[in-house]
Amino acid sequence: MAGDALDQLFEQDPPTLGPAEVAERLNTTTRTVYTWLREGIIPGYKVGTSWFIIRDELKEALRSGANTRRGTGPVVVIEQGEAEGD
């Protein structure tokens, strides 16, 4: 189950994490984590020039953003507009 895997991934971590720790856990770069923070993809708090991430909020964000099986997500319908002269 995804929750169990996330709990195991973060089980050794303290309640708050820095961007470098998140990058290490998620096998990405610190730069990517800063981008995710600025864009609101993952939750975080900026105090002065420093970011911190609450471990349990991050786990919940990751759980809610987990991939879903095809056919279970929202349906997007794109309609073509009328061409000029129609």
Image (tube, rainbow, N blue to C red):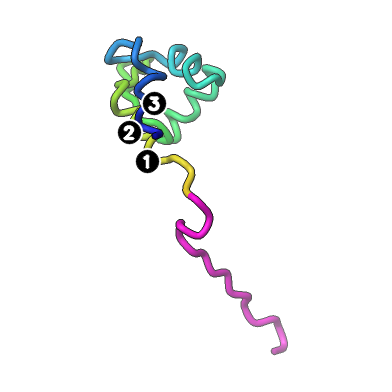
Amino acid type assigned to the residue bearing label 3 in the image: Leu
Q: Amino acid type of disc 1?
A: Ser
Q: Find residue 72 and report its horizontal and vertical position in percent.
A: 45, 57
Is the stretch drawn in magenta largely helix, strand or loop?
loop
**Left or right of 84, for residue 49:** left
Looking at the rendered image, the disc whose residue lies closer to the viewer, 3 or 1, is 3
Residue carrying label 2:
60
- Residue 12, given in percent of the width and then of the height, sits at 35, 10
Extreme-right residue of the structure: 85
Residue type for callout 2:
Glu
Please tell me how crowded label 2 is: few (under 14), some (14-19), or many (20+) other residues with Cα within 10 Å.
some
| Dot in front, 2 or 3 | 3
Q: Is the residue under label 2 in contact with that under label 1 (CB below 8 Å)?
A: yes
Please name the residue shown 29% across and 25% down the image: 56
Pick the front one: 4 or 79: 4
Label 3: which residue? 6
Q: Is residue 70 above or below residue 17?
A: below
Is residue 82 one of those drawn in magenta?
yes
Distance from label 2 to label 3 (Cα)? 9 Å
Q: Which residue is drawn at 35% across and 14% down?
A: 17
Horizontal arrangement in the rendering, residue 27 relative to residue 4 (left or right): right
- Rounded to the nearest angstrom, the CA distance separating label 3 from label 1 is 12 Å
**Residue at 40% from the left image edge and 31% from the top image edge:** 42
Q: Are marks 3 and 1 in contact (CB under 8 Å)?
A: no
Local crowd at mark 1 within 10 Å, few (<14), some, or many (≥20)?
few
Quarter placement of the C terminus: bottom right
Disc on res. 64: 1
Q: Which residue lies furthest to the front in this view?
A: 1
Q: State the extent of the magenta-drawn residues as a range.
A: 69-86
